Image (cartoon, rainbow, N blue to C red):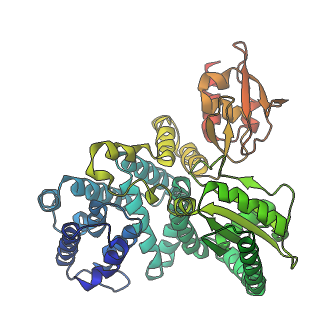
Amino acid sequence: MIPALQPIYNNLKGIYNNQEFKIVEEAFLFAEFKHQGQKRKSGEDYVLHPLRVAIEVSKLKLDVNSLVSALLHDILEDTDTTSEELKNKFGEEVMFLVESLSHLTRLKRKANYKNKTIYRVENLRNLILSSAKDVRVILIKIIDRLDNMKAIWALSPEKQVENAEETLEIFAPICRRLGFNFLGQQLEEMSFPYVYPKDFAEIKNRVSNYYYEIEKYLDEARDELAKFLEQKRLHYSEIQFRKKTFFSIYKKYKKEGDFNKIYDMIALRVIVNSVPECYTALGLVHQLWLPLPGRLKDYISLPKVNGYQAIHTTVLTNNNQIVEVQIVTKDMYQNNEYGMASHWLYNLSKDTKSYTKRQNVSGLKILYKSLKNIDFQNTNSSDLYNLLVKDLLSEQIFVVTPKGDVIDLKVGSTPIDFAYKIHTSIGNNCKMAKVNHQLVSLNHILQSSDIVEIITDRKQKPNKKWLEFAKMAETKEKIRKELQKK
């Protein structure tokens, strides 16, 4: 066994057979030979970078070709290796994945950094289009970016800010939309100090002291909850202690404007074995501690767009601490952390039917569908930036049609945004809206879980006032086009 590959073996022990491990070994030796003598800007041997990327990919338990492609992801761009050589040695699928990753790298190097907006729009567009053909492209690219961010200290100050901004605006939000919360959090935390250094210092100083003081109370609360659940004979798997990341606190603070209104800075996560036990645990938590009104969120009955499932409740513990309690099953926890990769991608390449499932991943499908509806030729770069970055990758809410279909919208969206998201003709003829069976104005701010119904009239046409309260750039673009026709 090659010592450098020991972490991969440990992550995949019992999943892959000896023949598959030999392919991984062969890929590593090939990468080591091709990258021989090459150094990173940090001064380390270049081959250590693709090795670390492969180790992280192995944690997602993807197929062997994903691991091989991770080890070889820079080989076409940075060595004399040809696509034909790659195909002959490792197969057509590996060649496709590595070519797709190399294509994205070449586009990045050719980008015009004088216009960051155009560059980021093109980069995001190409990233989604490449990933629509095979979602493993975006997975490997995200982990590649994660490893590059760990060595950001070796870049010039200007490049540090550029890379951190791009990571914070594009890569981290994509992780969130696809359900890779664990990866998204890491990217955000690495970028935050470089993009907003003053805010980072303020949040760190303020929160670090709070965390230090509160930790002992949380230990007591965790022990108290564990004893109570055992007394009531609920067989839980684990009770974890979770601290909110600095960047997540920063975003919440910007929204709330008051640290005292951030109730989920600390949380206890109860992991149980089944969905019924989630609701049993919820009842017991409320029996032990006082629940705060209006703070219960059931993401099991109505999951988030990216597939996130859990029950959230905020309580006042017996030592007068406000704590959020999250309740999940083991499968939910795994899916919430690693998204679609946790269950769907392992070994999918081994048969054709499963391979097609890779293209139906909900978060990626939504992004790709939205991308196809954008007129790149007739939309200026600023509007494209709003459409792609500020709409597609922004924080989302989900509302429900009367038929039960779940529609994702940008936070702050109105019935007008909802109508145009359903269909352009419904938006153009939107006369009235009902939210939760009550008539509301067209500038009403929608909330997650709202049931929204649009009442149309063929005589109704868009007017300029709609532009004032439409939240999404895509909605405004459609309204403007209709107004121009008039």
> 429 or 158: nearer the eye?
429
> 330 or 323: nearer the eye?
330
Q: Is residue 145 above or below residue 417?
A: below
The percent position of residue 298, horizontal first and vertical second, equals 71, 52
Q: How many marks?
A: 0
Q: Quadrant of residue 184?
A: bottom right
Residue 40 relative to residue 148: left or right: left
Residue 80 relative to residue 379: left or right: left
Q: Residue at x 27, y 59 (%)?
A: 98
Q: Residue at x 38, y 55 (%)?
A: 345
The percent position of residue 73, horizontal first and vertical second, equals 29, 65
Q: Quadrant of residue 440?
A: top right
The percent position of residue 157, horizontal first and vertical second, equals 51, 78
The percent position of residue 143, horizontal first and vertical second, equals 42, 67
Res. 258 in view: no
> 417 or 307: nearer the eye?
307
Q: Is residue 384 above or below residue 227?
A: above
Residue 344 relative to residue 267: left or right: left
Res. 322 in view: yes
Q: Quadrant of residue 123?
A: bottom left
Residue 89 relative to residue 120: left or right: left
> 55 or 348: nearer the eye?
348
